[in-house]
């Protein structure tokens, strides 16, 4: 027996070595499978495409981009085809569930944030940008962007802005948002003392001189110069200037009335599209430049809109609609409206 064992040892055919060979083959197999799965997730994530669909059933055309791409690759890849076959028959773990997808995305996110953090630390100084908006579930989300100087191997300098994630916010006061921002920086391993700039909108919780985020940050880091969002400042300036002028108020009010009378009914909207190519747009309170689309639709199609209003007067059965259409017809051909249409 000892001689047989010695012979096996010389030939490398012991039970342990055979087990090691099987384990190595198993590792190589799973590494190959997981590489394909992670590459698919990376492909979709880089393009901001959703992974999941209405269901998670292999072979179902509504199973989403992730499973759909895996099935496409499996047509030409034996390894992945065999893996999906076994996963579909529930014979083995498939690493295809939404939970596993999220785990992979979290790991990828950590790697990306780690590289961003390393670049910022190499640059040392940075600036921060923060803004909040509610998501579809009405949960307030804070988005944080860090601006820094990135230098490549050839010493080429590039000003870089990196988005570092969304953070759920429950306290939207200056103190609460400051705590959130500092927490994001600490998670990235960044020292607030190296912050040299901060930029937010003009909300009182952001730019307040006593309790705003910018004031609380400057208490900790006096070198963090605050620069309010230029676009938001310009928007407020233009809105305030327009609201102080009666002609502007009347003009934009008429534009909104035009949109409302046609958009509130499918039949009336169909009448409008008979006479115009560019449909009317609602006014936006968020950005002043967004009002340009509303003005364009009327400025270049005034004749068509007038024809649509006149037809609406003829076919509408509601006296209120007829009265409103007649009022708008008179309003849009007035000298005051025509001058504003060209000047604005």
Image: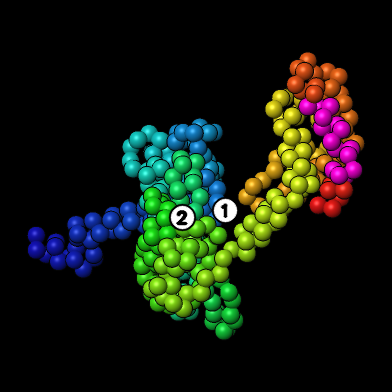
Residue at the image position 70 percent from the left and 40 percent from the top: 282
Identify the element where label 1 is drawn.
Answer: loop
10 Å crowding of disc 1: few (<14), some (14-19), many (20+)? few
Left or right of 24, for residue 218:
right
**Outermost residue toward the left in this view:** 1
Residue 1, percent across and down? 9, 60
Residue 118, percent across and down? 43, 73
10 Å crowding of disc 2: few (<14), some (14-19), many (20+)? many
Q: Is residue 40 above or below residue 208?
A: above
Which residue is nearer to you in this view: 9 or 193?
193
Colouring used for the render: rainbow
Residue 193, percent across and down? 40, 77
Residue at the image position 49 percent from the left and 53 percent from the top: 132
Which residue is nearer to you in this view: 318 or 99?
318
Which residue is nearer to you in this view: 89 or 290?
290
What secondary structure is the stretch in magenta mostly built from? helix
Q: Give the magenta part as a residue range.
A: 324-338
Identify the element where label 2 is drawn.
Answer: strand
Query: Which label is found at residue 47?
Result: 1
Which of the marked residues, 2 or 1, is nearer the chain's N terminus?
Answer: 1
Query: Which label is found at residue 142?
Result: 2
Which residue is nearer to you in this view: 136 or 322?
322
Q: How far apart are the two marked residues, 2 and 1, measured between alpha carbons?
A: 22 Å
Residue 280 visible here? no
Q: Is residue 317 above or below residue 9?
A: above
- Disc number lying in front (2 or 1): 2
Residue at the image position 19 percent from the left and 59 percent from the top: 16
Residue at the image position 33 percent from the left and 56 percent from the top: 27
């Amino acid at each position: 027996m000892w001689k047989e064992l010695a012979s096996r040892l010389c030939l490398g055919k012991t039970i342990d070595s055979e087990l090691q060979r099987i384990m190595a083959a198993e590792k190589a197999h799973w590494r190959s499978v997981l590489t394909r799965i992670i590459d698919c997730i990376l492909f979709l994530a880089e393009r901001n495409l959703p992974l999941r669909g209405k269901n998670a059933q292999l072979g179902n055309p509504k199973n989403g981009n992730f499973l759909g791409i895996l099935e496409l690759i499996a047509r030409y890849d034996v390894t992945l085809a065999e893996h999906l076959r076994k996963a579909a028959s529930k014979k083995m773990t498939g690493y295809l569930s939404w939970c596993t997808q999220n785990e992979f995305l979290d790991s990828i996110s950590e790697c990306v944030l780690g590289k961003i953090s390393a670049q910022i630390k190499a640059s040392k100084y940075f600036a921060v940008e923060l803004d909040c908006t509610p998501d579809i579930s009405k949960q307030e989300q804070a988005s944080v962007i860090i601006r820094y100087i990135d230098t490549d191997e050839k010493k080429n300098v590039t000003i870089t802005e990196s988005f570092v994630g969304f953070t759920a916010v429950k306290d939207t006061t200056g103190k609460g948002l400051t705590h959130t921002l500092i927490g994001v920086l600490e998670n990235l391993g960044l020292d607030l003392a190296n912050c040299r700039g901060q930029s937010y909108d003009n909300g009182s919780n952001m730019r307040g001189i006593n309790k705003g985020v910018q004031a609380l940050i400057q208490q900790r880091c006096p070198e963090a110069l605050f620069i309010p969002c230029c676009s938001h400042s310009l928007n407020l300036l233009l809105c305030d200037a327009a609201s102080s002028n009666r002609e502007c108020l009347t003009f934009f009010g008429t534009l909104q009335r035009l949109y409302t009378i046609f958009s509130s009914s499918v039949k009336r909207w169909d009448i409008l599209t008979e006479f115009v190519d560019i449909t009317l747009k609602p006014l936006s309170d968020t950005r002043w430049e967004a009002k340009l689309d509303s003005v364009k639709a009327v400025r270049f199609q005034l004749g068509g809109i007038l024809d649509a209003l006149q037809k609406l007067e003829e076919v509408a059965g509601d006296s209120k609609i007829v009265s409103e259409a007649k009022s708008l017809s008179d309003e849009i051909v007035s000298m005051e409206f025509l001058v504003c249409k060209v000047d604005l």
